[in-house]
Image (tube, rainbow, N blue to C red):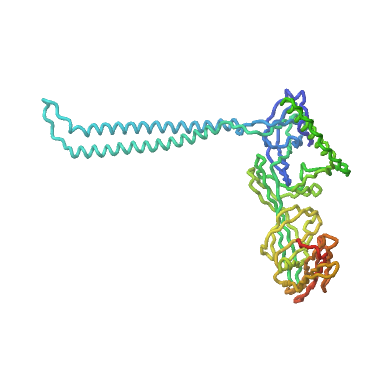
Amino acid sequence: MRRLAAIAALPFLAAAAHAAEIKGASRIDQVTVFPSGAEVTRVARVRMERGEHVLLFNDLPARALAGSIRVEGKAAGRLDIASVDTRRALIPLADAAEMASSRKSLEDAIQGLKDQRAQLEGQAAAAEAQKAYIDALSKSPAQPAPAGAAATPQTDWERLFGFIGQRRVEAQKAVLEAQLKIRDLDRQIRDLEGKLASLAPRPEERTEVKVFVNAGASLEADLVIRYQVPAASWTPYYDARLATGTKTQAPKLTLERRASIQQRSGEAWDNVQLALSTTRPGSSTSAPDLGTLTIDFEADAIPPPAPPAPRPMAAPLAAQRSAKLTAGAVADEESERAREQVVAPASEVRASIDVQGFQALYGIAGRVSVPATGEAKRVQIDETQADPALVVRTVPKREQKAFLYAKAQLAKGSPVLPGTVSLFRDGTFVGTGRLPLLPAGEEHELGFGADDSVRVKYALTEEKRGETGLISSSKTDLRTWRISVKNLHQRQIPVSVVDHIPVSQNQDIKVELTGKTPPSRREVDDKRGVLAWDYKLEPDEEKVIEFGYRASWPGAKRVQYRN
């Protein structure tokens, strides 16, 4: 088999102008969805004779990016792809032969219903005539006998009137039944006529692809058409399930990666092989440039020129011209001063994260269908397990509770994209969180809710304010806290207690850490003034932390604390 390939937008061949045109039909076989956009792969089988041909495909959506269209394939003999041309065109939706057959069926059905309607109208007219005859017959007793006529036998009028009444009821019933059937037939005819009107070929804008080929012999070729569409995306979301374990059993953390896929590309993806990629086509491919940054003194402001002395006999037009010239001079000077100012290059702030450097491809098992309506299609990507390190963290100044955290390597082998994570602890849903972008191999910490088996107490034990000095007085602020943490678990548990002290923003304000219990870490997470005390508490073990601070500043000044 020979492989062949070509790209879109190459020049037409002169010989192709007289080539035979073959209309081909393709179907979607594979789709790779990116965080923004998707690549669609269509396949088609075309049979052709020896010579030059133009293969025409008009089943691509209108939103297909022309620059992304690629055609390649395999053939049993020599087949050269000379060029590929694309354009947007209005294409009738229905097949002509199929439409003609459907139209003939509808027209026959409509004619049959109209024939039934004509029969019912005849029946209704006959019943109306019968009613008129019966009405005329009912008036016979009121007509006098002609003069000189022979005597007629006595008529049984009671029996005659009963017969007339019965026949009239039957005729009226026949008229009503015919009218009801006619009404129903009219509704059916309107419905069929509406369907017939809808069979008119409604054109739809699509992308037309012409492939100019030259076949060395009569052959059959399998072509592949690839293109990208912008109106598609996938969003990751996760389930994190923590089994806290026991005294003898280690904890386990399971991360299930899932994806929500949406697309409005103009074509349904039915029964396709689906893959999800972390690549972002169309994003920046190189680092931005920086220009030279300079610093200089600002130019002295140039005072505006004094207005010219008014002329006693100045005409109004001359005054208007003078005012315009003065305003123009001022505007020019302001523009010149603005150009002399130092301007730093502006940078664009983006809400999305560029993960061009972290590429991963997730192949979804089986075949999947994704409608073109924007409705979310949810699929599972994979499931990974990790051995987490459990730690209990508490910030008693904010809340006298302890919270359980699990730290593990969540991104194994491929990056973790930002997304919402549902948190489960020992099978119970405890809330939701947010995962950031995690490169492959990076560790991350997830919180799994309050830990009621760790008791926390927090109290302010000392608070003093004073003033010292006679000539140059200074004010002081002394505060001390007592924190107690007790482990009620049946196993050892790491505990981290976090608090802070004020950070001076002025050299005249002095802040000193006090207390009996020095912290294990300072500047936690690179935050000034944030302290942490780390312990490994055995069952029923309790730790007490006593710490505080002393702040001093000139007595003539006033200070304020800000979080």
Residue pictured at 68% horizontal, 61% vertical:
431
Q: Quadrant of the C terminus?
A: bottom right
Report which quarter residue 458 is drawn in.
Answer: bottom right
Does residue 556 lie above or below 63 as drawn? below
Report which quarter residue 562 is drawn in.
Answer: bottom right
Does residue 62 lie above or below 258 as drawn? above
* Residue 229 location (% of width, % of height): 71, 40
Does residue 254 lie above or below 167 as drawn? below
Q: Is residue 94 left or right of residue 553?
A: left
Q: Nearer the viewer, residue 288 or 345?
A: 345
Does residue 371 lie above or below 551 as drawn? above
Quick one: which residue is furthest to the front in this view?
A: 312
Q: Is residue 561 visible?
A: yes
Q: Quadrant of the N terminus?
A: top right
* Residue 557 location (% of width, % of height): 80, 62
Residue pictured at 68% horizontal, 50% vertical:
260
The number of discs equals 0
Q: Is residue 533 visible?
A: no
* Residue 102 location (% of width, % of height): 54, 33
Residue pictured at 80% horizontal, 47% vertical:
356
* Residue 451 location (% of width, % of height): 71, 68
